[in-house]
Amino acid sequence: MTFVDTNILLCAASTDPSEARKAAAARTVVNRADLALSVQVLQEFYVQATRPTRRDRLTHEQAGSLVEAWLRFPIQETSVPLMRAAFETAARQHISYWDAAIIEAARLAGCRIVLSEDLADGRDFDGVRVENPFRS
């Protein structure tokens, strides 16, 4: 299983011509069957995709339909144990709580890889490695 960060979903939904290459790569990712997501990732996607200042903003209905479609993947719930693990990872790894929550959601979902453009490509967080699917 491979965990997908919010930025990959946003790229998959993009209609911005300047992001066409990344959008195609992201769509290939979200068409895979071996993915996992978290409630946090889906929430962040909805908020960012419908943001009024986004150039290719989605409507509530469009973003909601995509979230519903992605519920076909295993979804890691937010929980107190996940939150506590993220607190520890944030402190130990010197990263934001939100990034640590992505890493710990991936770990709880049984994923050893997180696909993300935002986290450090190649960095290993105690057995969970980040890969940027857009690197050339």
Image (cartoon, grey):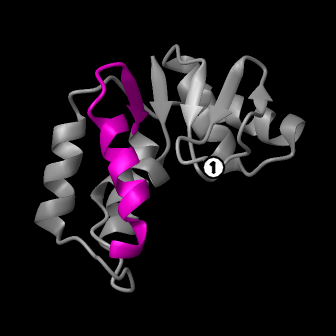
In the depicted view, which residue is nearer to us: 105 or 1? 1
- Give the residue type that dot 1 points to: Trp
Residue ranking furthest to the front: 136
Residue 64 position (above or below residue 71): below
Instruction: Tell me if 42 is positioned left or right of 119 in this view.
Output: left
Q: What is the x, y in percent for residue 119?
A: 68, 47
Q: What is the x, y in percent for residue 72?
A: 21, 28
In the depicted view, which residue is nearer to us: 132 or 4? 132
| Residue at image point 68% right, 26% down | 129
Range covered by the magenta-colored residues: 17-38
Residue 136 position (above or below residue 75): below
| Residue at image point 37% right, 36% down | 29
* Quadrant of the frame with the N terminus: top left
Asked if residue 94 lies in the magenta stretch, the reply is no
Question: How many numbered marks are there?
Answer: 1
Residue 124 position (above or below residue 108): below
Image quadrant assignment for residue 85: top right
| Residue at image point 33% right, 74% down | 17
For label 1, the residue is 98
Residue 92 position (above or below residue 109): below
